[in-house]
Image (cartoon, coloured by chain):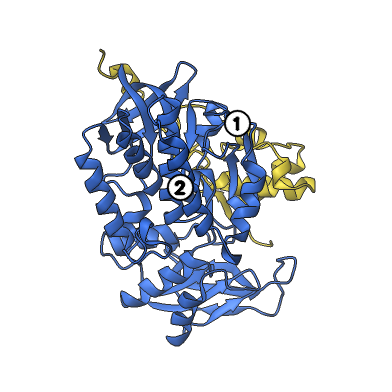
Amino acid sequence: MSSDAIICRCEDVLLSDIRRLLDSGLTTFDEVKKFSRCGMGPCQGRTCRSLVLAEIARHRGIRVQDLEPGRFRPPGKSIPISAFLEGGEEQ
Amino acid sequence: MFRTELAVVGAGPAGLSAALAASECGVDTLIVDNGSTPGGQLVKQTHKFFGSKAEHAGTRGIHIARLLAGELQRSPQVEYWSESTALGYYEDQVLLVEREGRAHAVHCDALVVATGAAERHMVFPGNDLPGVYGAGAVQTLMNVHGVKPGERVLIVGAGNIGLIVSYQLLQAGVRVAAVVEASRYIGGYAVHASKLRRLSVPILTSHTVKEAHGHEQVERATVWQIDETFTGVPGTEIEFEVDVICLAVGLSPVTDLLCQIGCKMKYVPELGGYVPIRNENMQTTRSEVFVAGDASGVEEGSSAMLTGRLAGYAAAAYLGKCPDFQNKRAECQRALDALRAGPSGQKVRAGLSVVVSMEAGTC
């Protein structure tokens, strides 16, 4: 693709950013995430993960099913820290 | 800490059916959903369902949502938390839920994950311009809020969702410039495609979006032909003056909670992406965790209700509360087999053959 396109809408990561990181030697979703913040926004990768995985697969010349999807950790969405400070009701 | 026998994540067709089946067996159930009204995707589906009468064939999705929600209300054993999000699940069977700005710990003896699916996005220049929507967003705007998404739309994807949304746009008085489809064939039912062709909407197979143009929002889309390797063919570009590009390019199961729990997952293209390995009772490799609906593999609303019911009964059996489980299981399975029969179910059957495994726990 000649012109650029957005991969991660939450964190404004471009296709060219992903390709540059892959050219620099990164090989997994988690590595790309740590270097670009891709997948760390409000949607937590629900939109961009599959796009990034497809790009990694293309770059490495393997199938998406042969890649690790990356780690998932709670909380599953961005929440204010006050949600924990105030806590839930105790019983 | 809040305690429940069964926690169900998601109040779409699968989650509601699971909760209703479990409560029918006398299981105390909490259903957690991030929407404001129960029904999940059903609340925007104004079309009538196909399939069998038992799964409400002939009834519109929005009405099925009301039917299921009504049953939920009449069921004293089900507690329903709206606008609540499951944030994580821990070793000691505690589900963390965000509700009204606070984190709540919920202890459950069994868990059904019915988190549905998310729409796929596409990579093309201009894909972040206002006016580029997922088909689900277009349906939400039109069918839930009564808002026209634009005046002239390009639809990307000729599966059932793309075709149905095209027709609904026409009904709402919005012009549909064309439907483009990357594959060589129209993926949706001929009955939907024929309706559009009769209304002279072109359906271009082996075509995709090359680029979206515009300043503040989408003003124009360039479409081009693609070859067998899905590579664009220069010189075949067609321009469409549109203010909306509606992407209906498939769904992926939302399985982040299952991944986080540590359920064994597998990437199955036929089912839309990563799905959990499970046995024929929808039980995952983590014995108290069950899966239902699109989160177990993308199908459609009727099968979501059936896998939901199956998961609900199986969870009840796991809790020792479904003595008639084998019969109930067989009944659900028969209906599922009927839905997945024939050429249109071939893809799903192929996907299930690699993911339904005795490796997962046994009830």
Residue drawn at 54 percent across, 58 percent down:
B340
Q: Are marks 2 and 1 in contact (CB under 8 Å)?
A: no
Q: Amino acid at mark 2?
A: Cys
Question: Nearer the N terminus, badge 2 or badge 1?
Answer: 2
Frontmost of labels 2 and 1 is 2
Query: Disc 2 versus disc 1: distance between alpha carbons?
Result: 19 Å
- Chain letter, blue in picture: B
Relative placement, left or right, of B225 versus B293 is: right
Q: Is residue B49 above or below residue B6?
A: below
The location of residue B175, given as percent across then percent down, is: 39, 79
Residue drawn at 35 percent across, 24 percent down:
B5
Q: Which residue is mark 1?
A: B360
* Front-lying residue, B227 or B93: B93
* Front-lying residue, B151 or B53: B53
Q: Which residue is mark 2?
A: B332
**Mark linked to residue B252:** none
Residue drawn at 43 percent across, 30 percent down:
B317
Can you say which quadrant of the picture contains the N terminus of chain B?
top left
| Dot 2: element | helix
Relative placement, left or right, of B312 versus A27 is: left
Q: Is residue B270 visible?
A: yes
- Chain letter, yellow in picture: A
